[in-house]
Image (cartoon, helix red, strand yellow):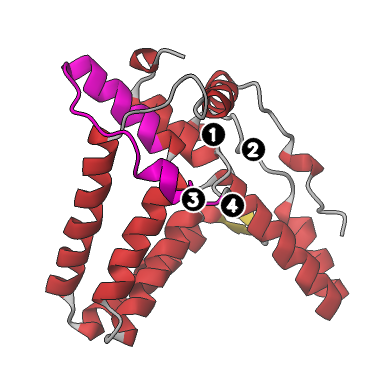
Amino acid sequence: MDWSNVTYDELLTSLREVDWSQPPRPMSEFFSRFSIPKTQQKLQQRFKCNVYYYRSSYALIVLVSFVVAFIRRPTALLSILAFGFGSLCLNDTFATMLSDRMLRFIRKLHPPLAQRIRATSGGHNGYGAPPGKRSVKICGVQRVVVVATFLSIGLLLLYYSAAHLTILWATLTGNAVVLAHTVLKTPNLKTRLSSAREEFRAVWRGYQQPSYDAHDYNL
C-alpha cells in the first residue's frame, strides 16, 4: 500500500473506526531498525504507517508518561483517566462495545430498565458512515454527551489538582518520544506490516461494514 496516497483525514478516520484492543507490539520489534528518512515524502509515509501500525504502543507510552508524572497526585491522575476514557469513547468500536456490555450488565440487575434503555438506543450509524452522519449511543445516551461529561470531569479534577505544569511536562515528554519513534522507526513493509496494510485498506475503502443494528440490543 502506498501511504503517500493516504491523506491525514483518512488516517484519522481509520484510527477512529479501527479496533484498539490489540496489544502493544513486542519490544524487540518496537526498538529495532531505526534510520533517518532521506526525503520529506519518505518522512510522511513513515509517519502515517507507524502511527497506524504502532497505535497501541504509542497510546501506552503516553499513558505511562502521565502515570509517572502524577503518581504522587491522585486527583490529577484521575483527571487523566477521565480524559482518556472520554477520548476512547470517540472510537466507534469502543463506544458500541461499551454500550453492549453495559446493557448486558444492566439486564442482569434490572431487566425492565435494560428494556427501556434498549428502546431508546435503537441502532448505530457509525462504522463507515461519513463523519457528519455518525450517530452512536452509549446506553441510550448520545456519545457526544458522554464524551463531554468525562472531559468536563477531567477539567474540573485538573483544576483542583493545580498540576498544570506537570501535565504540560507529561504531555511534551510522551508526545516527544512518540514523535521521535514515528520519524526514525523503519517500517518492515514486507512482513510485519502486511496485516496492517490489509486492515487499513479495509477500513479506508469501507469494506468493513458491520451493521451496528446487529449488536445485541435484543438483550
Please give the name of the residue rendered at 85% of the width and 75% of the height, measured from the top-left corner.
108
Alpha-carbon span between mark 4 and mark 3: 17 Å
Magenta-drawn stretch contains 29: yes
Q: Is residue 140 left or right of residue 54?
A: right
Please state the total of marks drawn on the protein image. Answer: 4
Please give the name of the residue rendered at 58% of the width and 27% of the height, measured from the top-left corner.
195
**Disc nearest the viewer among 2 and 3:** 3
Q: Is residue 175 above or below residue 39?
A: below
Place of residue 147 in the rendered image (x, y in percent of width and height, measured from the top left): 46, 59
**Disc nearest the viewer among 4 and 3:** 3
The type of residue carrying mark 2 is Asn
**Disc nearest the viewer among 1 and 4:** 4
Alpha-carbon span between mark 3 and mark 1: 31 Å
Quarter of the figure with residue 154: bottom left
Dots 2 and 1: beta carbons under 8 Å? yes
The type of residue carrying mark 3 is Pro
Residue identified by numbered label 3: 24
Residue identified by numbered label 1: 133
Magenta residues (range): 23-51
Q: Which mark is residue 94?
A: 4
Residue identified by numbered label 2: 125
The first of marks 2 and 3 along the sequence is 3
